Image: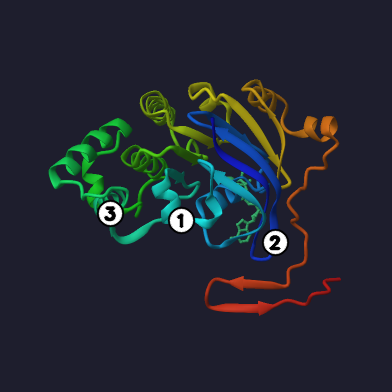
């Protein structure tokens, strides 16, 4: 059964068109691997699916459980069962992790969770992701190492128990043992709760441990290729050049020599630069 259906989705950020007609479907309980070169719109797609207001959908549709996802606000999408683990989780000084988790859990329930039940659940889940329990007393992600931040994202996933979890490079920054732990958590969640996953990664290792049902490749803001897991090993061995040749697509390279209209130097100065750089 189809759970998430994305049709001809176009979206822009800061006036730049990033998604240029994305078509993608995720079925209930399915794990989909999303690959693609740097800067081609993968994280943008997840931000748009989650409802980040910085990203403007210019055309197309997203149906979730047969309903129009675009008409829902970000918290409503979360309550409907969507979850996003960030590529770069934000540090939030002043917000204690445990309070944040309790608030998030309560926002998904009609009755507030009992304090004892919450702490028991939190302690058990910390063990699952191998984070020391006392970390929940620290401010959210504040000063956490790269690997701790990623395991903290998985901790939230397990606490919130979503229908579809979108994981953006969850494996980056994880050591070998931590990748094994995170993969075990993902597999257990799939097995016990039938959670569907949309997983972005640049590395085949994660996909050897979390075996996706299908894989899709995003290039230039579009899904240009879909297939089974063998697509992942092909890309791991051969890169993306074969796609240019086989599909006749020109992969947009990052423009490093483009003259800029505006240069911001921190927050203390903004300098207009001559537009016609000779
Ligand atoms: N808030 C923003 N403001 C300006 N440009 C943005 C913003 N968010 C994304 N972009 C641009 O959109 C393009 C796509 O970015 P995105 O993060 O979606 O790429 P990606 O495929 O996830 O890359 P990576 O594999 O490196 O994570 C990039 O050129 C990026 O600089
Ligand atoms: Mg990204």
Give the residue at mark 1. 74
Distance from mark 2 CB to nearest ligand 1 atom below 8 Å: yes
Residue 32 location, x and y as percent? Answer: 56, 31
Q: How many other residues sit within 10 Å of disc 2, few (<14), some (14-19) or many (≥20)?
A: few
Looking at the image, tell me whether mark 1 or mark 3 is earlier in sequence order: 1
Q: Nearer the viewer, mark 1 or mark 3?
A: 1
The residue shown at (42%, 43%) is 81
Q: Is the residue 228 above or below the residue 158 in the image?
A: above
Residue 16: which numbered mark, if any?
A: 2
Q: Is residue 227 visible?
A: yes
User: Would you identify the image quadrant in which residue 155 lies?
Assistant: top left
Viewer-proximal residue, 261 or 71?
Answer: 71
Q: Is the residue 61 above or below the residue 121 in the image?
A: below
Q: Left of 267 or right of it: where is 232?
A: right
Give the residue at mark 3. 103
Marks 1 and 3 sit apart, C-alpha to C-alpha, by 15 Å
SS of the residue under disc 1: helix
Residue 263 location, x and y as percent? Answer: 66, 72
Marks 2 and 3 sit apart, C-alpha to C-alpha, by 35 Å
SS of the residue under disc 3: helix
User: Would you identify the image quadrant in which residue 94 lies?
Assistant: bottom left
User: Would you identify the image quadrant in which residue 181 lies?
Assistant: top left
Viewer-proximal residue, 42 or 178?
Answer: 42
Residue 109 location, x and y as percent? Answer: 28, 48
Viewer-proximal residue, 37 or 145?
Answer: 37
């Amino acid at each position: 059964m189809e759970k998430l259906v994305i049709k001809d989705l176009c979206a822009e950020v800061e006036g730049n068109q990033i998604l240029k007609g994305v078509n993608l479907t995720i079925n209930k309980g399915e794990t989909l691997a999303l690959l693609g070169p740097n800067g081609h719109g993968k994280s943008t797609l997840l931000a748009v699916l989650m409802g980040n207001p910085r990203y403007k959908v210019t055309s197309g549709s997203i149906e979730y459980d047969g309903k129009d996802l675009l008409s829902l606000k970000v918290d409503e999408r979360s309550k409907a069962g969507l979850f996003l683990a960030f590529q770069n989780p934000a540090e939030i000084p002043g917000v204690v992790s445990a309070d944040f988790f309790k608030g998030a859990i309560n926002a998904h329930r009609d009755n507030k969770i009992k304090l004892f039940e919450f702490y028991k659940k939190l302690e058990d889940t910390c063990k699952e992701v191998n984070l020391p329990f006392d970390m929940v007393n620290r401010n959210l992600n504040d000063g956490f190492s790269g690997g701790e931040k990623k395991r903290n994202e998985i901790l939230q996933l397990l606490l919130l128990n979503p229908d579809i979890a979108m994981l953006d490079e969850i494996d980056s920054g994880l050591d070998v043992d931590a990748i094994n732990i995170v993969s075990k958590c993902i597999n257990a969640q799939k097995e016990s709760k039938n959670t569907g996953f949309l997983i972005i990664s640049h590395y085949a290792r994660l996909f050897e441990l979390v075996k996706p049902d299908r894989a899709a490749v995003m290039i230039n803001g579009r899904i240009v290729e879909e297939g089974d897991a063998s697509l992942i090993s092909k890309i791991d061995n051969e890169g993306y050049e074969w796609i240019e040749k086989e599909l006749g697509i020109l992969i947009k390279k990052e423009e490093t020599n483009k003259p800029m209209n505006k240069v911001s130097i921190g927050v203390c100065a903004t300098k207009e630069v001559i537009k016609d750089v000779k």
